[in-house]
Image: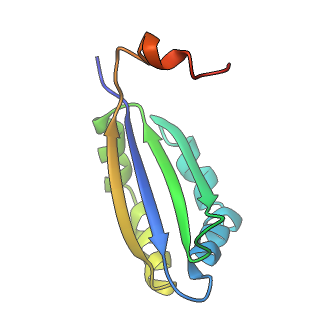
Amino acid sequence: MPMGITVNIYYSGKDGNARKFAEEMEKSGTVAEIRRETGNKRYEYFFSKDDEQTVLLIDSWESQEALDRHHASPMMEKISKLRDKYDLHMKVERYVEDASGIPAADKIFVKE
């Protein structure tokens, strides 16, 4: 059974460029295209209240194969050009889904 993959990408730049990048990704329709790709579970930007020069992208895929297809798609050239346009730097964190779910001891802290 394939394991889900989540990649947190922290884009940072100067003069609000990370936010401008995220806004252009949305307005250009690129985000919508990525969300329609087979295997995409989530593609969403978040803005930090403490660091106005950094934007977090949460990018989740059903499997490594789905992520590999995305990375091999023409979409990556669009994204790369926009990153260069805004001179962004990246910090990346990668997480693999835990099939066992949230442990019972942790669930007491979760209100659903």
Q: Is residue 12 above or below residue 101?
A: below
> Residue 70 or 23: which is nearer the viewer?
23
Quarter-wise, where is residue 73 in the image?
bottom left
In this picture the colour scheme is rainbow
Horizontal side of 21 relative to 71 (left or right) equals: right
Q: Choose top left, top right, bottom left or bottom right for residue 105.
A: top left
Which quadrant is the N terminus positioned in?
top left
Residue 109: percent from left, percent from top? 57, 22
Question: Percent position (x, y) of residue 63?
Answer: 34, 32
Residue at figure coordinates x 41%, y 31% from the top left? 62
Quarter of the picture containing the C terminus is top right
Furthest-bottom residue in this view: 15
Q: Is residue 69 above or below residue 85?
A: above
- 45 vs 62, nearest the viewer: 45
- Residue at the location (67% across, 69% down)? 23
Answer above or below: position of 99 versus 91.
above
Q: Nearer the viewer, residue 45 or 54?
A: 54
- Work out whether residue 80 can be spotted: yes
Name the foreground residue: 34 vs 109.
Answer: 109
Residue 46: horizontal and vertical position, in percent?
61, 57
Residue at 63%, 73% in the rendered image: 19
Query: Image point 36% across, 29% down: which residue?
Result: 97
Location of residue 40 with respect to 77 vertically, above or below:
above
